[in-house]
Image (cartoon, rainbow, N blue to C red):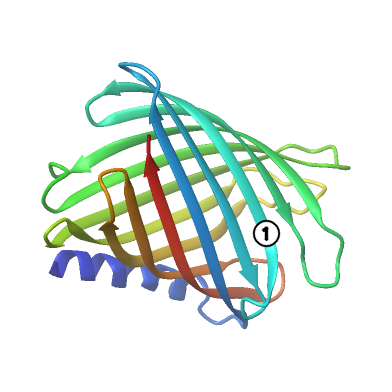
Amino acid sequence: MALLIRSAAAAAGLALVAGTGQAADVDNQVWSVAQFNADLGPRTLFTMDTQARFFDDASRLGQVIVRPAVGYRLNDTTNAFVGYAYVRSKPAGRAATHEHRAWQQLTFRAAGDGKGLTLNGRTRVEQRWVEGRDDTGIRFRQQFRLTAPVAGKVRAVATNELFFGLNNTDWGQRDGLHLVRSFVGVSVPVTGNLTVEPGYLNQYVVRRGENAVHHALSITTNIQF
């Protein structure tokens, strides 16, 4: 548990380091996520997450994401996925944007046995298109997720994910660090197929001009078919 706490502190520290010396625009948000997972065969997987993110002190729906994928189980601890994502974003006072993504992902166990203290990794590459624009944005994402048993089947969770743009586009993506996203919470089994994961999410957004800090109540529902 001490290692879990240190990991969460280090993740939050990355966000603070990223913003050292720069002003930041702060917003309190609520993120609601529904994650669906299914085995389609001995090695074939299906996953989809849908997200609703509420911005401006959680007063309005600012972003919706729908992200399905199919995967292949390479071994007991490693899976490969290809997927698509639709992202509708509505900044305050501006027209909505519609983004489409193709993405490829590898999930793997970096340490532990999945029962005790366990570290998992997720590596994702995205190709991003915005309707009405021509350029394709390429983005790299790396997440690490640390879990530890707390009581019974309840587990403590800490994650950190870094987002890097690999090119510049005419619609605003630039190369370099985009986001530092960190989460601390618990994973609580409700039934054999349903798990709820509430917690605190911190997101540091690196932008031209004023950067941003998002404090979010995040609630993820995981459903296994």
Q: Quadrant of the C terminus?
A: top left
Q: Position of residue 142 (x, y in %)?
A: 43, 47
Q: Which residue is mark 1?
A: 63
Left or right of residue 7: residue 202: right
Crowding near pointer 1: few (<14 within 10 Å), some, many (20+)?
some
In terms of image quadrants, where is residue 106? top left
Percent x, y of residue 4: 21, 64
- Looking at this view, is 224 or 64 the one in front? 224
Which amino acid type is shown beneath numbered disc 1? Gln
Q: Tell me if residue 189 comes above or below residue 112 in the rendering.
A: below
Quadrant where the N terminus is found in the figure: bottom left
Rendering coords of residue 60 (x, y %): 70, 72
- Residue visible at 49% across and 46% down? 141
Among the 4 quarters of the image, the one containing residue 36: top left
Quadrant in the picture for residue 114: top left
Q: Nearer the viewer, residue 36 or 185?
A: 36
Up/down of 171 relative to 91, above or below: above
Identified at 49% across, 51% down, the residue is 34
Q: Residue furthest front?
A: 191
Q: Is residue 20 left or right of residue 145?
A: right
